[in-house]
Image (spheres, coloured by chain):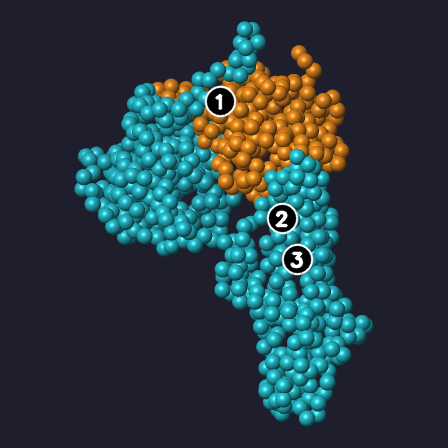
C-alpha cells in the first residue's frame, strides 16, 4: 500500500444555528477515510447524509470542529484562508451544478485563466495552457472567447473540469459531477475523468448518490448515512454485495433498466422491507 | 510574438464579458433616450453656463424687476430683484448637480464598500453595520440637515456629503443582500478553491454581479438629493452667494402675488431633472432585466381534425403535435415536431428522452399548460374523442379527469397554506363536498398514499414536511378527483433513491387499483423499467422509437435507443475490477 495523499481522521463538522445560545448542529459525527495517490474513493449516500459536507470540509468550505484532515502529510483543517491559498495548486474541486459553478459574466478564457494568474503564471504561458486545457477536456480552443451560457450542461462541466486540472492538482473533490447531466453526457464526462486520472495520476474523492456511477468510477467506496460511514470497502464488493443493511437498501432501491430484472428486484426489496417491518 | 502582443491577446481572451449594448438597449427605449438627452443637456448647460448666458446671474437691473418673459434679452424675464431668470436657472444647475454628485459619491463609497464587506464576510461586522444602518435610517434626514446648518453654515457641498452619509444605509442594505445571494453561487466557492484572494473575488466576481442594481439605485438617490437640496434652499438654508433652484423658488414665493410666473421656472427645472434621473433608473433596470419581446401566442387552426381517428383502447391520442416558442426575431423555435402516440386505457406510457427532447413540452401540451410564449402550431391532442386543443377544453378536464404530478413537489405547494387546506379546497370545488366530507376524504387519501401521521400532516405547512412526504401529498391531490389520466413529469427525479422506490410503488399501486392511465415523463430507464407498459423514446422534439417496454428494452430497433440504454451504466464492470485486470495483463 502506498502512502496516502489525503487522510481524514475522526472529523466532525458542526454548523452554527441562528438564534441566541442555540447549540450548533453536528452534520458529521467523526468520519475517517484515506485516499491514495492515483486512486478514486467514492462517497455515496442520500441527501443529508453528509457526503457533500465532508467534501467541503476537505476543501476548507465547511467548519471542522474536531479531528484532523491531512493532505500530503500536512494538517490542513485549521488553516486560515491565506494559508490555504497555496494548496490550490494541489487540491481542486468539480461541483455538481455546472450552471452555478461558472461565473456567467466571464468568458471561458477568463474563467480558466483565473487560477493560472492567481499562481502568477505569465501571460504567454497562460494562453498556451488555456488551449491545452480545453483540448484536454475535448472542447474546441475557440471556446475561450465565448461565455458559459453558450454551452450545454455537459460542456460546462467539461470547462469546470478544465479549471480544476489547470494547476495539475494531486486531488480533485468531485461533488456529484454528473448528477445534473443527461445519461449519455454523464457517460462521456465519467470517461473523461477516468482518462485524466490514467494520464496524470490525479486522485479523486468522488461524491455521488448513484451506486452505479460510483461502481464505474471508484476503487474504494465509503457509504455514508446520517453523518457516519456505515460501510467501507472495495468498489466492486460494496456495490454488488453490500454487508450493511443501509447499503443493501440503497442497492435494492436503485431501479435497473430491464423490466424483468427490475420486477425481481422490486419483489426482493418489498420482501426485505416486510421482513424489517415484522 | 512580442510580450505586448501577448498581453493584449490574453486580455482579449480573458477579459470579462460585457453585456453587449446595454447603452444601445437604454437608447432603444424612448424614455431612456429622452431622459439621457435631458440629463446631458442639463450637464452641458451647467458646464458651459458662462458662455451660453447673456447676463451674469447676480446683476440686478432695477428696470427689469418682475419683467415678463422676452423682455430685452431676458428670455424668461427678470425676478423680483431684476436679475435674469434664465441665467440664474442655468448657473443654479451647477450647484444642484455638484451637490447631488457629492451625495452620490459619499453614499456609494460608504454604502457599497461596506455592503460588499458586510455581505461577503457576514459575522460581527455585518451585525454592527446593521445596527448603525438602523440608527441612521430612523433619523429624519431633512431635520438633521436643518440642524446641521446651525453648525456648518451655508456649505452646500458639505451638507450634501452629510446627506450622502445618511442615505448610505440604503446602499449598504441593497449591496449586502445582493452579495449574500451571490455568495451562495458555486463559482465563488470555486474561485476560493482556485486560490484567489478575497479582495480579488470581491472585485472580480461579486462586484460585477451586483453592479446593475447599484446603477439603478444611484440614479434614484441623485433625484432624491436634488429634491432635498432644493427643499433646504427653499427654507433659506442654501448658499446665499450663488444662484440655486431652491433659492429661486424661495424668492418667487415672496413675490407670489406680484409675479406668480416666477414659481414656474425653477419648478420645471427641478421636476424635469429629478424626473429624468428616476426615469433613467427605471429604464436601466428594465434593460438589465431585458425580457425578450415575445409576441402573443397563436393557436393552431387545424387542431382536432383527426380526433375521430383515435384507435380502439386509446384514452389520449396525440398526433402530429408541433409546439413552437415565439422568438424575439419573429420566427418560432420548434421544440416538438410532429409527435404522435396513444396512451392506452389502464396502461402506463413512458415518455423518455434527454434534456431538450421535448418530452416535458409534450406533456404540458396535453395539460394545456404550455409556458408563456409557447403554442401548439400543428397536430392534435384528443382525450376520449374530445379535442383538447379547443378553447377551454383542457381547463375543463384538468384537475377532474386529467391530473398532474410535478417534478418539484415543494415548489408546487403554496407555503402560505396548510397541507389540509390545499387538499380540502380543491375537493370541495371539484366534487361539491361539504367541509367535513372533504376533510374525511383528504384524510383517507393521505392514509392511502402512506403518510403515517395524517392529522399532523393535514395541519402542517409545506416547509414542515420532507420532499418525499410532499410528493405523496401531491399524489394524493392528483388522485383525489378520481382522474382517468395522470401526467407525471419526472415525479421522482428530485427524491432520494430509497424514497423514489417507495413513490414508484405507490404510483404503481394507485394506478392498478383505480385502473388509471398514466403518462410518465422521465430520463431514467430504471424508472421506465419499473413502471411503464409502453415506451416512447424522444430526441430533439421527435419520436425516435415507440413500443412496449419489453420491445424497447429487449430489442431496441433504433441506434439512438441502443446508445441511451448503453449509457445507463447497468452491468458495467466495477472500476476496482477493471483496474486489477489491467494491472495483471
Instruction: Judge by depth and name the residue closer to the eye, A49 or B62.
Output: B62
Would you identify the image quadrant in which residue A56 lies? top right
Query: Could you say where residue A119 lies in the image, as x and y percent from the top left?
Result: 71, 33
**Which numbered disc covers residue A212?**
1
Quadrant assignment, res B272? bottom right
Dot 2: chain letter: B
Tell which subunit mark 1 falls on: A
Mark 2 vs mark 1: give the one in front. Answer: 2
Q: Which mark is residue B36?
A: none
The residue wearing badge 3 is B171
Q: Seen in the image, is B221 located left or right of residue B20?
A: right
Chain B: colour as depicted: cyan
Is B274 placed above or below B445 here? below
Q: Is residue B133 left or right of residue B380?
A: right
The quarter of the picture where residue A158 lies is top right
Residue B495: horizontal and vertical position, in percent? Answer: 47, 34
Instruction: Give the secondary structure at mark 3.
Output: helix
Q: Which residue is mark 2?
A: B208
Determine the residue positioned at 60% across, 37% down: A109
Work out whether residue B504 or residue B202 is closer to the camera in this orientation and state it: B202
| Quarter the C terminus of chain B occupies | top right
Camera-nearest residue between A33 and B572: B572
> From mark 3 to mark 1, how far is it between C-alphas?
50 Å
Query: Which residue, as the protein is rendered here, is positioned at the far front?
Result: B1
Q: What SS does tag 2 mark?
A: helix
Chain assigned orange: A
Q: Residue at x 51, y 56 (%)?
A: B25
Amino acid at each position: 500500500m502506498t502512502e496516502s495523499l489525503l487522510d481524514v481522521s475522526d472529523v466532525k463538522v458542526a454548523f452554527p444555528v441562528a438564534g441566541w445560545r442555540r447549540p450548533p448542529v453536528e452534520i458529521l459525527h467523526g468520519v475517517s477515510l484515506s485516499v491514495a495517490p492515483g486512486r478514486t474513493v467514492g462517497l455515496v449516500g442520500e441527501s443529508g447524509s453528509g457526503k457533500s459536507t465532508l467534501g467541503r470540509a476537505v476543501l476548507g468550505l465547511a467548519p471542522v470542529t474536531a479531528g484532523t484532515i491531512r493532505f500530503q502529510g500536512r494538517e490542513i483543517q485549521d488553516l486560515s484562508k491565506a494559508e490555504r491559498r497555496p494548496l490550490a495548486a494541489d487540491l481542486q474541486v468539480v461541483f455538481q451544478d455546472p450552471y452555478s459553478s461558472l461565473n456567467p459574466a466571464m468568458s471561458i478564457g477568463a474563467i480558466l485563466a483565473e487560477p493560472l494568474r492567481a499562481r502568477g503564471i505569465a501571460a504567454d504561458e497562460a494562453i498556451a495552457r488555456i488551449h491545452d486545457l480545453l483540448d484536454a477536456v475535448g472542447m474546441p480552443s475557440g471556446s475561450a472567447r465565448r461565455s458559459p451560457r453558450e454551452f450545454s450542461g455537459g460542456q460546462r462541466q467539461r470547462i469546470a473540469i478544465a479549471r480544476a486540472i489547470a494547476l495539475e492538482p494531486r486531488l480533485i473533490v468531485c461533488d456529484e459531477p454528473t448528477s445534473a447531466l443527461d445519461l449519455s453526457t454523464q457517460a462521456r464526462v465519467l470517461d473523461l475523468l477516468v482518462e485524466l486520472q490514467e494520464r496524470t495520476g490525479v486522485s479523486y474523492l468522488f461524491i455521488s448518490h448513484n451506486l452505479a456511477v460510483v461502481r464505474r468510477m471508484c476503487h474504494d467506496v465509503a457509504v455514508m448515512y446520517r453523518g457516519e460511514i456505515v460501510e467501507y470497502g472495495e468498489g466492486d464488493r460494496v456495490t454488488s454485495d453490500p454487508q450493511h443493511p443501509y447499503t443493501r437498501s440503497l442497492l435494492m432501491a436503485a431501479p435497473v433498466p430491464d423490466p424483468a430484472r427490475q420486477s425481481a428486484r422490486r419483489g426482493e426489496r418489498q420482501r426485505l422491507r416486510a421482513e424489517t417491518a415484522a | 510574438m512580442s510580450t505586448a502582443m501577448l498581453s493584449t491577446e490574453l486580455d482579449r481572451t480573458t477579459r470579462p464579458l460585457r453585456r453587449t449594448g446595454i447603452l444601445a438597449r437604454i437608447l432603444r427605449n424612448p424614455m431612456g433616450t429622452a431622459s439621457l438627452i435631458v440629463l446631458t443637456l442639463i450637464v452641458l448647460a451647467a458646464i458651459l453656463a458662462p458662455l451660453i448666458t447673456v447676463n451674469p446671474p447676480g446683476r440686478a437691473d432695477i428696470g427689469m424687476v418682475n419683467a415678463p418673459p422676452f423682455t430685452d434679452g431676458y428670455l424668461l424675464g427678470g425676478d423680483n430683484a431684476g436679475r435674469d431668470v434664465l441665467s440664474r436657472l442655468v448657473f443654479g444647475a451647477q450647484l444642484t448637480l455638484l451637490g447631488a454628485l457629492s451625495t452620490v459619491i459619499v453614499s456609494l463609497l460608504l454604502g457599497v464598500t461596506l455592503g460588499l464587506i458586510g455581505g461577503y464576510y457576514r459575522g460581527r461586522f455585518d451585525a454592527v453595520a446593521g445596527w448603525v444602518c438602523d440608527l441612521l435610517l430612523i433619523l429624519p434626514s431633512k431635520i438633521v440637515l436643518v440642524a446641521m446648518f446651525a453648525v456648518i453654515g451655508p456649505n452646500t457641498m458639505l451638507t450634501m456629503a452629510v446627506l450622502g452619509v445618511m442615505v448610505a444605509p440604503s446602499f449598504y442594505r441593497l449591496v449586502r443582500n445582493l452579495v449574500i445571494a451571490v455568495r451562495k453561487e458555486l463559482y465563488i466557492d470555486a474561485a476560493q478553491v482556485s486560490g484567489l484572494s478575497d479582495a480579488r473575488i470581491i472585485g472580480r466576481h461579486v462586484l460585477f454581479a451586483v453592479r446593475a442594481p447599484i446603477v439603478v439605485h444611484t440614479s434614484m438617490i441623485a433625484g432624491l438629493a436634488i429634491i432635498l437640496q432644493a427643499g433646504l434652499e427653499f427654507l433659506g438654508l442654501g448658499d446665499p452667494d450663488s444662484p440655486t433652484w431652491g433659492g429661486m423658488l424661495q424668492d418667487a414665493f415672496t413675490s407670489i402675488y406680484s409675479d406668480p410666473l416666477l414659481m414656474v421656472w425653477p419648478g420645471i427645472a427641478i421636476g424635469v431633472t429629478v424626473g429624468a434621473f428616476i426615469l433613467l433608473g427605471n429604464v436601466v433596470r428594465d434593460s438589465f432585466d431585458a425580457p425578450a419581446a415575445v409576441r402573443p401566442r397563436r393557436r393552431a387552426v387545424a387542431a382536432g381534425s383527426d380526433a375521430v381517428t383515435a384507435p380502439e383502447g386509446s384514452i389520449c391520442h396525440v398526433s402530429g403535435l408541433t409546439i413552437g416558442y415565439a422568438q424575439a426575431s419573429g420566427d418560432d423555435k420548434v421544440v416538438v415536431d410532429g409527435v404522435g402516440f396513444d396512451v392506452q386505457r389502464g396502461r402506463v406510457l413512458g415518455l423518455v428522452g434527454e434534456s431538450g427532447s421535448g418530452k416535458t413540452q409534450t406533456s404540458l401540451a396535453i395539460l394545456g399548460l404550455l409556458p408563456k410564449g409557447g403554442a401548439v402550431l400543428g397536430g392534435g391532442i384528443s382525450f376520449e374523442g374530445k379535442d383538447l386543443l379547443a378553447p377551454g377544453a383542457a381547463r375543463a378536464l384538468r384537475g377532474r379527469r386529467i391530473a398532474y404530478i410535478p417534478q418539484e413537489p415543494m415548489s408546487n405547494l403554496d407555503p402560505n397554506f396548510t397541507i389540509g387546506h390545499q387538499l380540502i379546497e380543491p375537493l370541495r370545488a371539484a366534487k361539491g363536498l361539504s367541509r367535513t366530507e372533504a376533510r374525511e376524504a383528504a384524510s383517507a387519501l393521505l392514509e392511502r398514499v402512506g403518510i403515517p401521521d395524517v392529522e399532523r400532516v393535514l395541519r402542517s405547512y409545506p416547509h414542515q414536511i420532507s420532499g418525499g412526504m410532499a410528493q405523496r401529498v401531491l399524489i394524493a391531490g392528483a388522485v383525489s378527483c378520481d382522474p382517468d389520466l395522470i401526467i407525471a413529469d419526472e415525479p421522482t427525479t428530485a427524491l432520494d433513491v430509497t424514497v423514489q422506490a417507495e413513490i414508484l410503488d405507490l404510483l404503481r399501486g394507485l394506478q392498478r387499483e383505480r385502473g388509471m392511465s398514466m403518462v410518465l415523463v422521465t430520463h431514467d430507464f430504471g424508472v421506465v423499467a419499473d413502471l411503464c407498459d409502453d415506451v416512447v423514446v424522444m430526441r430533439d422534439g421527435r419520436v425516435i422509437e415507440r413500443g412496449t417496454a419489453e420491445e424497447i428494452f429487449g430489442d431496441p430497433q433504433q441506434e439512438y435507443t441502443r446508445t441511451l440504454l448503453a449509457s445507463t451504466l447497468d452491468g458495467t464492470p466495477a472500476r476496482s475490477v477493471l483496474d486489477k485486470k489491467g494491472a495483471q495483463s
